Amino acid sequence: MNKISINLLPQTVLLERIQSSKLSLVNKLSIGVLVLVIILTVGVLLLRINQNRESSKMMDEVKVAEDKVLSFRNKEVAVYALKNRLDAISSKLGTDEKVKTMFNLIVYLTPPEVTLTDVSVDKNGSITASFNSKSLAGIDKLFLGLSNKETNMNLVSKVDLAGISLGKESTYRFSLRIAAVK
């Protein structure tokens, strides 16, 4: 059975319906694309906000790490300076036993009222030393200790007074050349 359909609508109405259906389809597609663009934009914005938050966290962690590094740098400078001082002292003392013994003897024989201000020791063990003292009694004790064979353990052969002066503050400054026994 064949159905017969008769279209009594004018041709213009039919054309308008076809056009409106095409327009409706274009409108629906446009709305779909617009919704998709909005969703993607919101997603990108949320991702960007998340990245900014993560980035600021990382920057805070980097700042903390930089502060730690700076504090370690100050400590490193201090340790390096101490190491250089120890190296200088070690080089002054040297590995030669005679040099060490002469240096230790001078430090041991220096009385409390006398201050040892400068020491230089040559490879033979001879010492040139500068001292300060507020009293002549301290200077006398130092000379007696250096010149007595028992107290200087037979390590000193000769003591020369290189110079002596009296400062403004009534402080005696003097230099000694102490020759080691060969």
Image: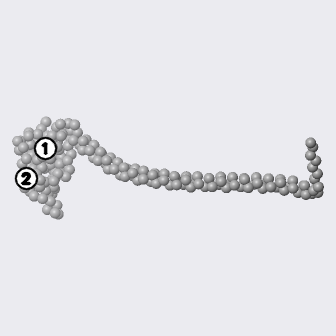
Q: Residue at x 16, y 63 (%)?
A: 169
Observer-nearest of 7 and 20: 7
In the image, what residue type sits under mark 1? Leu
Determine the secondary structure under disc 1. helix
Left or right, 136 with respect to 12, comes to left
Q: Residue at x 10, y 51 (%)?
A: 111
Left or right, 93 with respect to 55, comes to left
Residue 125 at x, y percent in the picture? 17, 40
Residue lying furthest bottom in this view? 168
Determine the CA span between mark 1 and mark 2.
Answer: 16 Å
Which residue was labeled with disc 2?
A: 140
In the image, what residue type sits under mark 2? Asp
Q: Nearer the viewer, mark 1 or mark 2?
A: 1
Quadrant containing the C terminus in the rendered view: top left
Q: Residue at x 8, y 39 (%)?
A: 154
Quadrant containing the N terminus in the rendered view: top right
Residue 171 visible in the snapshot: yes
Q: Relative to residue 131, is residue 101 depicted above or below? A: above
Q: Residue at x 7, y 47 (%)?
A: 145
Which residue was labeled with disc 1?
A: 105
Residue 174 at x, y percent in the picture? 15, 53
Assess disc 2: are there few (<14), some (14-19) or many (≥20) residues with their C-alpha within 10 Å of its C-alpha.
few
